[in-house]
Image (cartoon, rainbow, N blue to C red):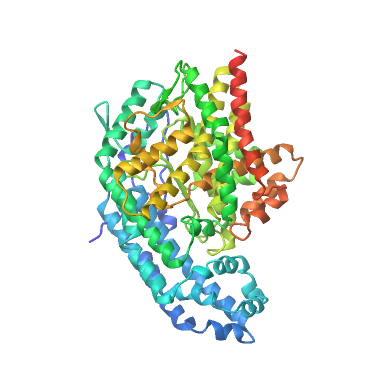
Amino acid sequence: MTPIITQAPARSATANKASKSVGSLPEWNLADLYPAMDAPAVKNDLDRGETECIEFEKAYKGRLADIAASPSGGRTLGEAVRRYEAIQDVLGRLGSYAGLLHSGNTSDPTIGKFYGDMQERITGASLHLLFFTLELNRLDDAALDKARADPALGHYRSWLEDVRKWKPYELEDRVEQLFQEKTMTGNSAFVRLFDETMVNLEFDVDRQRLALEPTLKLLLDEKEKKRKAASNALAKTLKQNLRLFTHITNTLAKDSEIDHRWHGFGDIAASRHLSNRVEPEVVEALVSSVRDAYPRLSHRYYSLKAKWFGKKRLPHWDRNAPLPKVRDRIIGWPEAQNTVLTAYGAFSPKMASIAERFFKNHWIDAPVRKGKSPGAFAHPTVPSAHPYVLLNYQGKPRDVMTLAHELGHGVHQVLAAPNGPLMASTPLTLAETASVFGEMLTFKKLLAETTDKKQRKAMLAAKVEDMINTVVRQIAFYSFERKVHTERRNGELTSEWLCNAWLEVQRESLGPAIDLRPGYEVFWTYIPHFIHSPFYVYAYAFGDCLVNSLYAVYERASSGFAERYLEMLAAGGTKHHAELLAPFGLDARDPKFWQGGLGVIERMIGELEALDSGK
């Protein structure tokens, strides 16, 4: 019998041994979704979801054209979309619960089986819904426009517009069904293989066996010896698994190529741009602007940092090192919570009130645990529930920024939820706006309170590095992905080719002041975005530049900015980026928009240079 696993369980050994300096760290309570894997509610919802999918197919498949042409077509189609939306909420709740459980402990075989079984059942049920958007896209434009005049269907205007954008790329129903069903043994299977492999890797750092997350954190340690040891440990273990990661990358890139070829997408990133609701020329303008700015941003900053360390070139393990002679203090969880909530509250009491619910209601999982997914995320689950935030909090200043970042996502998700399952989701390009803005609010608060010159310099340097990591690094990652997916069309890629391509884009983006020592060539293997969401990464740069421009408007605004900002977040996926940014006088299609965002980073680097010259 499957053992009962309740949420909130007795605290894990890792959580019980939390560092005194960090304090007791919260673990999330998933009971708001389901009380346990074998709870009757899980089986009931799964059975109900499957039944409703089948009944929905019987009720509407092959009938949408006749319904649209009928006198009550708009009302009837509106009822169908509302019914479709309700099913998505049920299946989404089940999928979110299984996914969050798995993220919290990917090593547990019982949870792994539950996660896999749920994916199979949900995918199987969803096949009965596949016809719906395909048939909607076969409706005559005039007929759909007439039907949409009825408020019942007009309510879903933005969702219908997004659905219609996929019309040129859709195939015959049974082919689309095959593509969806085969994800379980194709894309999804290799993503899961990557995740479960990565969380079970161990890295030998000074005779201590560490997971990925703590090892990466050591690259931020104040002692170079530890940073170098962590880098060498990463290189050694990743090299040992290089063949597997090469195989996963080849398989997923080929899978993407097959999908794009059959669906008729021209560019390798076309489907990502479409799902992001962003024009390819806007992305190209962003990428070109950032690549042109490499010398003014990353090259210039790392040259300055090398000078601080008394070196001509920094070895790659020193790239994110804390400044010399500035001790990185450990920030306890209560202080981190207070810092973020106070910064949010100074901007908008409503924003702080929403964020506070994450702490009060156990919506955050913060401890580092064996088997837990590395990194951080905010998962919206479904509008009938609420988001959850996963962190790996270790008390570093960057961890506080990560908390501010993920809570920004969480606030956004809460505000957008009333739009419903079909229209709450925000394109990735705008999804990063709230998170990066939350970071900026927190950073500005901390900076304003800092009078010590060394501490101020360290904070500015850390913020510049975060922005470089968000803008320069992510565009370099995007360039690497484009190389990989383009070359994969010519045949299977070798590990050597992948490593050389990685080094090429890294040298271009980081500049001559960073010395990429042996071992760094395999660091592409642990970046999950390449696996989970190909071409996602440019969304970070989009969001950061957007927020820089948005924050400049905020600093100049006399009143009403916070209200307009929260209205933008509450729109969720109901509006295009041009429509959302118009109230702030911003336009992402204007090349000056990107220059303005990048100029913020340049000015911060200039301030650091001024601090140096004035010492």
Outermost residue toward the right in this view: 558
How many tags in the picture?
0
Write the residue at 70% across / 37% down. 555
* Relative height, residue 359 to residue 172 (above, below): above
* Relative height, residue 520 to residue 388 (above, below): above
User: Who is closer to the viewer here, 311 or 528?
Assistant: 311
Outermost residue toward the left in this view: 1
Residue 452 in view of the camera? no
The C terminus, quarter of image: top right
User: Who is closer to the viewer here, 591 or 553?
Assistant: 591
Could you say where residue 197 lies in the image, as x and y percent from the top left?
A: 28, 47
Write the residue at 52% across / 69% down. 168
Could you say where residue 296 lies in the image, as x and y percent from the top left?
A: 58, 31
User: Who is closer to the viewer here, 593 or 211?
Assistant: 593
Q: Quadrant of residue 155?
A: bottom right
Write the residue at 24% across / 39% down. 240
User: Who is closer to the viewer here, 553 or 612?
Assistant: 612
* Relative height, residue 329 to residue 421 (above, below): above
Outermost residue toward the front in this view: 490
Give the left or right position of residue 406, taking residue 3 as reference.
Answer: right
Q: Quadrant of residue 390?
A: top left
The N terminus, quarter of image: bottom left
Give the left or right position of residue 205, taking residue 455 as reference.
Answer: left
